[in-house]
Amino acid sequence: MRLSIFVIMLLLAAATSLSSAQTLQPNAGQRQLIERGYGMFIHFGVNTFNEVEWSDGKLPAASFNPTNLDCDQWIQTAKEAGFRHVVLITKHHDGFCLWDSKFTDYDVAASPVKTDIVAEVAKACRKYGLKLGLYYSLWDRHEPAHREKDPAKYVTYMKNQLTELLTQYGDICELWFDGGWAKPDADWRIPEIYTLVKKLQPNCQVSVNHTIGIPVKPGKIKNPEDYAKGDLIRFWPVDFRTKDPNLSRADD
């Protein structure tokens, strides 16, 4: 059978710079992001086989069992639909990894089907001429280091896994982070993560979901039109913004 995949069509516009100084002019990497435009998210993992959207990191790895896995078909379909790039969810909030990571036992290697999904998608992208982007959840409901009081332990865990993802699968055009609400913003140490990504993949464009919107109290978000002079982007540095209500708004 053909496995169903969750698809989100994306048309992105970049509006922040790679350096600490903001500019209205996109840099070379952001221009490439704008030109890529039409992209497809592929959301596939242990939850797929448990009929839930999110899980708490306790679903058994053995429940991940794609008996007719065909990543080539996914990317062929994307190509035929006119997509120029795909973004693969490599690890969602449950912590299950679609590659054989040396830093966790909650991954495809612990499942009945040990295929490295990231590798297969990367291979298919090269075959059909699509760019490959990756999604990696900051929030991890399985990994014990995530619950340590010292955030450095989990940051090290993330760096180790990101090094695997950014050194084993060829060029990565985009890297999407998500789940930043699970800890205080500073605990993610985004500048350290960003520096690592640029060291390993200089042309990779980085973002964190909910980049725009500063939480001021439960249920209340300060959006860009309410910013005061000197207010910073919530997660910085990034190469493109998400959840910005002004990004696609036409001038009056």
Image (spheres, helix red, strand yellow):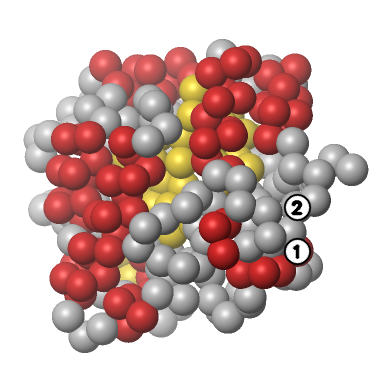
| Residue drawn at 26 percent across, 83 percent down | 148
Which residue is identified by label 1?
A: 49
Q: Position of residue 36 (x, y in %)?
A: 49, 20
Question: What amino acid is at disc 1?
Answer: Phe
Q: State whether residue 154 is above or below residue 204.
A: below
Q: Does residue 196 show up?
A: yes
User: Which of label 1 and label 2 is nearer to you?
Assistant: 2
Q: Quadrant of residue 34?
A: top left
Who's the residue at 26% across and 70% down the image? 154
In this rendering, the answer to whether 109 lies above or below 119 is below
Q: Secondary structure at mark 2?
A: loop
Disc 2 marks a residue whose amino acid type is Pro
Specify whether 142 is left or right of 213.
right
Which picture quadrant has residue 53? bottom right
Mark 1 and mark 2 in contact? Answer it, CB < 8 Å: yes
**Which of the 4 quarters of the picture holds residue 108?**
bottom right
Q: Quadrant of the N terminus?
A: top right
Query: Foreground residue, 110 or 176?
Result: 110
Disc with the residue nearer the chain's start (1 vs 2): 1
Please give the name of the residue rendered at 24% of the width and 20% of the height, measured from the top-left corner. 27
Q: Is residue 11 above or below residue 238?
A: above
Please name the residue that numbered disc 2 is placed on: 66
Q: Position of residue 142 (x, y in %)?
A: 46, 76
In the shown orientation, is residue 70 left or right of residue 142?
right
Density class for disc 1 (Cα within 10 Å; few <14, some 14-19, many ≥20) is few
